[in-house]
């Protein structure tokens, strides 16, 4: 595979975008998991799908819009979806998890409507659902670069605030931290990372890249920083090994990456059990 | 303007929907005091604390922190807080004692700022003050309830506060650690820290606090511990709303 990467641009694009996704998704995933918001990634990925379907529909209806990257419309939908999740969580303060199925089903509903107007599935949409190595364009790579850099900068800038917000929200508010603003920034970032990761693992599998490496790391890590480091390591391992296996075995890359992440999780669970004996 | 008063509460009232929770409460906590704020469950103690911490806005009345009206007060790092919910944290959270204690510095440090040497020393000193120096690298979930509560005090102390507020801090702490815990608070007070301790259990705090305030929607008593000891049981029962006898704990 390594030789082919030098020869074929589409493979290079997929590899670079994969590395960036393997970094950004678990980096945000740590905060999502410890705040018990794991399903939020699923809700936002389905809203992103609605945006992508809308983009593809626009492209088929108006030739002028055909050159637009539907990913950007997906990103817009994802950000709006993230804000709606927050609004609904505030409305249903005692049933906060309700926001997720509401947004998730709205996303699927819209997607199905847009797909039906466009007269059914297209190959393009299929690649967004499950990820596709050959579909990653240079523009997608640049989008992933910008989004991963934004994720790294925001986490670096607000690490201590996000840590405190995740561990003890009431204390964060008492400390004078602007919890609403920081949470808003974080959730928008999650929406952008989900949309940018869509090409590699696809709508249906992106949340796994945010949660599986973290699920493995928190079984092993003693400290929060260690959990972050291990999550990124496991994320990268899943992406690199998954892309390699997918190339060699001619499997779907998204699914292969996720299954590698599951195998890493099983190793972490086994390792923890072995240590406890 | 800053004076010798840490907290000044003037005629504060608060309502949840139509129910009066606080009625015209006025209270002053001088610097260096250790105030025990006592009252039965549902007496408005936690609500009053939330007003002082800026988490709730009173319907009427004013609050001053270190001489500054609460609306314009910005030096929140001068106030440490230990919540009654602190001990109900997510026990699977992968954090060390040191990381939790250092999180108390979040408001004091600016964006992008990592722990400085001075910050690390402040965290070490805070952990030493609560007797947890040797446990800094341990996962917080591995500690006993009493030790965990000490970590939360260390977190509040890390920013070197002038005022420490504790809301029912011994909830979930086993009885044999409660006495040790109050001794630690008494010791911190003798070293100059102003403390406000909220509890529904009068008997456990009378030998540590310097002042006592009895609250049941309105303030029934505010005086020093000696004056409180002279109150007869009838007076105390009146504000508790039912017959009550105060027993000091023998340790």
Image (cartoon, coloured by chain):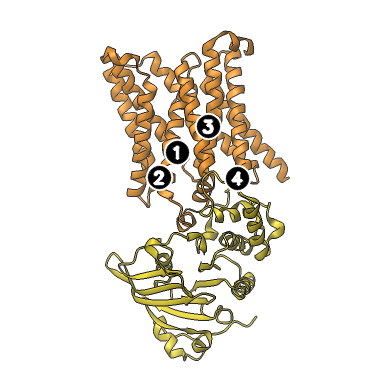
- Camera sees residue A136: no
Residue A97 tag number: 2
- Residue A189, horizontal then vertical, whole percent: 44, 36
> Residue A248: in sight, yes or no?
yes
**Mark number displayed over residue A224:** 4
Q: Residues within 10 Å of mark 1 (few under 14, many from 20)?
A: some
Q: Chain of mark 3?
A: A
Q: Point out residue B57 in the picture as x, y percentages from the top left corner.
A: 35, 63
Q: Colour of chain A?
A: orange
Q: Which residue is mark 1?
A: A39
Look at 50% across and 34% down and name the residue there: A151
Q: Could you tell me how far apart the alpha carbons at marks 3 and 2 are, in whole angstroms? A: 24 Å
Q: State left or right for residue A124 relative to residue B246.
A: left
Q: Which residue is found at the position 58% from the left and 22% from the top?
A: A242
Residue A132: image x %, image y %?
A: 48, 17
Callout 2: chain = A
Q: Residue at x 58, y 14 (%)?
A: A247
Provide the secondary structure element on which disc 4 rests.
helix
Which residue lies under the disc numbered 3? A24
Tell me what hue chain B is rendered in.
yellow
Q: Nearer the viewer, mark 4 or mark 1?
A: 4
- Dot in front, 3 or 1: 3
Query: Closest to the observer: B24 or B70?
Result: B70
């Amino acid at each position: 595979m390594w030789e082919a990467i030098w020869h074929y641009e589409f493979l290079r694009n997929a590899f670079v975008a994969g590395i960036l996704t393997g970094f950004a998704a678990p980096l945000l995933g740590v905060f999502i998991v410890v705040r018990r918001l794991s399903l939020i990634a699923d809700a936002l990925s389905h809203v992103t799908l609605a945006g992508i379907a809308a983009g593809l529909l626009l492209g088929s209806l108006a030739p002028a819009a055909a050159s637009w990257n539907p990913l950007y419309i997906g990103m817009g939908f994802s950000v709006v979806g993230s804000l709606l999740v927050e609004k609904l969580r505030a409305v249903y303060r005692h049933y906060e998890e309700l926001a997720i199925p509401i947004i998730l089903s709205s996303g699927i509903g819209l997607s199905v409507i847009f797909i039906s107007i466009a007269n059914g599935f297209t190959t393009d949409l299929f690649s967004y659902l499950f990820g596709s190595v050959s579909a990653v364009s240079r523009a997608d790579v640049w989008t992933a670069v910008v989004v991963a850099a934004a994720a790294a900068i925001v986490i670096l800038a607000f690490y201590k605030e996000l840590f405190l917000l995740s561990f003890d929200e009431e204390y964060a508010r008492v400390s004078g931290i602007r919890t609403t603003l920081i949470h808003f920034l974080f959730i928008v970032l999650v929406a952008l990372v989900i949309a940018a990761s869509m090409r590699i693992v696809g709508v249906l599998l992106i949340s796994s890249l945010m949660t599986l490496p973290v699920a493995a790391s928190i079984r092993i890590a003693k400290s929060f920083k260690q959990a972050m480091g291990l999550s990124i390591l496991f994320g990268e391992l899943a992406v690199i090994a998954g892309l390699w296996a997918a190339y060699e075995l001619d499997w779907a890359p998204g699914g292969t990456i996720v299954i590698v992440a599951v195998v890493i999780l099983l190793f972490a669970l086994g390792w923890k059990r072995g240590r406890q004996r | 303007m800053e004076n010798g008063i840490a907290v000044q509460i003037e005629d504060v009232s608060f309502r949840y929907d139509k129910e009066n929770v606080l009625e015209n409460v006025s209270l002053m906590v001088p610097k260096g005091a250790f105030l025990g704020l006592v009252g039965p469950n549902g007496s408005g103690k936690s609500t009053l604390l939330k007003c002082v911490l800026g988490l709730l806005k009173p319907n009427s009345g004013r609050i001053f922190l270190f001489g500054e009206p609460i609306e314009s007060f910005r030096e929140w790092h001068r106030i440490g807080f230990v919540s009654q919910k602190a001990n109900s944290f997510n026990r699977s959270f992968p954090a060390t004692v040191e990381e939790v204690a250092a999180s108390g510095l979040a408001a004091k440090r600016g964006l992008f700022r990592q722990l400085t040497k001075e910050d690390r020393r402040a965290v070490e000193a805070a952990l030493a003050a609560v007797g947890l120096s040797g446990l800094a690298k341990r996962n917080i979930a591995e500690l006993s309830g009493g030790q965990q509560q000490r970590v939360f005090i260390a977190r509040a102390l890390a920013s070197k506060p002038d005022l420490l507020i504790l809301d029912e801090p011994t909830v979930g702490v086993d009885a044999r650690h409660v006495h040790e815990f109050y001794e630690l608070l008494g010791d911190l007070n003798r070293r100059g820290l102003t403390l406000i301790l909220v509890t529904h259990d009068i008997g456990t705090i009378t030998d540590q606090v310097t002042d006592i305030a009895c609250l049941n929607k309105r303030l029934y008593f505010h005086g020093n511990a000696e004056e409180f000891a002279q109150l007869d049981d009838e007076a105390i029962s009146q504000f508790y709303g039912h017959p009550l006898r105060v027993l000091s704990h023998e340790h």
